[in-house]
Image: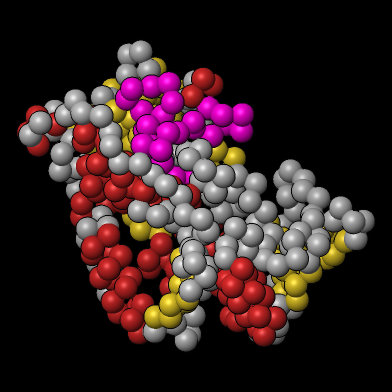
Amino acid sequence: MSRLETKDQRVVIIGMGDTGVLVATRLSRHFKVIGISTKPNLVSGQELGKRLADLGWWSRYYNTPLRRFKALAGIEIHHAKAERVDLANKWVAVRDQSNNETLISFDFLVIASGTSNGFWRDDHLRSEAQIDARLEQDAAAVREASTVAVIGGGPCGVSCALNIRRAYPEKPVSLFISADLPLPGYHEEARQYYERELTAAGVEIFSGHRAITHEPAPSAGTIHFESGQSAEADTIIWSTGNRQPHTHFLPDALLDDEGFVRTQNTLEVDGSDCLFAIGDVASTDPERSSARNWAYGILVHNIKRKAAGKAPNKLYSPPENRWGSIVGPQDDGLTLHQDSGKTTRLSRWLVDKLLLPTIVQRVIYRGVERLNG
């Protein structure tokens, strides 16, 4: 099927975060693409530690208005929240900030709606000004605190503890983890590496401390642990991995017991011939790892084949261990951890002058308009 023939087909993408934007930029030349996003920006879920410790730098690369992506120029984007999906008639109902409902028809639907996770990921409708205000509020809570406690030893918890301690060496920073070592799911060498880095930076690690969580989780005050122990902090950062999928708009038959989208290794959704799912919301594996690992290329390829009347033939296979950057660029560069345990170091100059502006923004995202000034 030619590009002109597929251009008549409509692909609706629910969720314009990192993965949704990457899918949209690859499909826009072949289909009529419509994006649905609760935020007018791509507010990345990556590099949480840098977001809290160095908001100005983080915002330059990770809080990007969707209008700045050159490859999204011809895409219709609705700043709205998905309410329900009608699979029989192939439409999705969305509601905007003025409470107006719109029905959007599709030939294919991509679920990239992500998850809520702690304070930094949600599906609330927000304007650009509201996004900026929330980001500053979170950074100010760390900046003004005398003591900081981070709960959870995953990559976000490790990144927060290490970046905050290095940015504010006068602040006591504690990291409470339930395991013996941080970073479960990573290679053992990566886990030991960051135990040493955290300790050398002056982060106090409390292993074997499983926090008792409450809703809403306190952002300051007392933390209680299952052991009966407790701790106090001016600012508490919860990073316990309690992800809640944004799937309320989908029929229950498409979801697993935890509410994630039942997804095949072709990234097609079980029980449908027109739905695909990708990212944190897709139940490809326990780590929901199609949010990384170049899975968007597999999804794009398989949608194009499906639109041409062919069977999808590329399969997503999760890596044995998690890999990539864990704490983001530091003064001495960026350390990348492979799933084999091997590390690669890129200089800070290379990160700031080549990797982020050229490889990420120009190549991976296919062009991002420069900020004035």
Residue 210 higher or lower than 54, as above or below: above
Q: Nearer the viewer, residue 371 or 110?
A: 110
What residue sits 55% from the left and 48% below the top? Answer: 287
What residue sits 81% from the left and 62% below the top? Answer: 208
Q: Is residue 22 left or right of residue 58?
A: left
Residue 328 in percent (x, y) is at: 48, 72
Query: Coloring scheme of the render?
Result: secondary structure
Q: Is residue 296 left or right of residue 72?
A: right
Q: Quadrant of the N terminus?
A: top left
What residue sits 85% from the left and 64% below the top? Answer: 231
* Residue 281 included in the magenta stretch of the image: no
Residue 98 in percent (x, y) is at: 42, 32
Note whether residue 134 is visible.
yes
Which residue of the protein is positioned furthest toward the right in this rendering? Answer: 228
Which secondary structure class fits the magenta region best?
loop
Residue 187 higher or lower than 350, as above or below: above
Q: Quadrant of the C terminus?
A: bottom left
Highlighted range, magenta: 255-280
- Counting the numbered discs, the total is 0
Residue 283 in percent (x, y) is at: 51, 38
* Residue 265 included in the magenta stretch of the image: yes
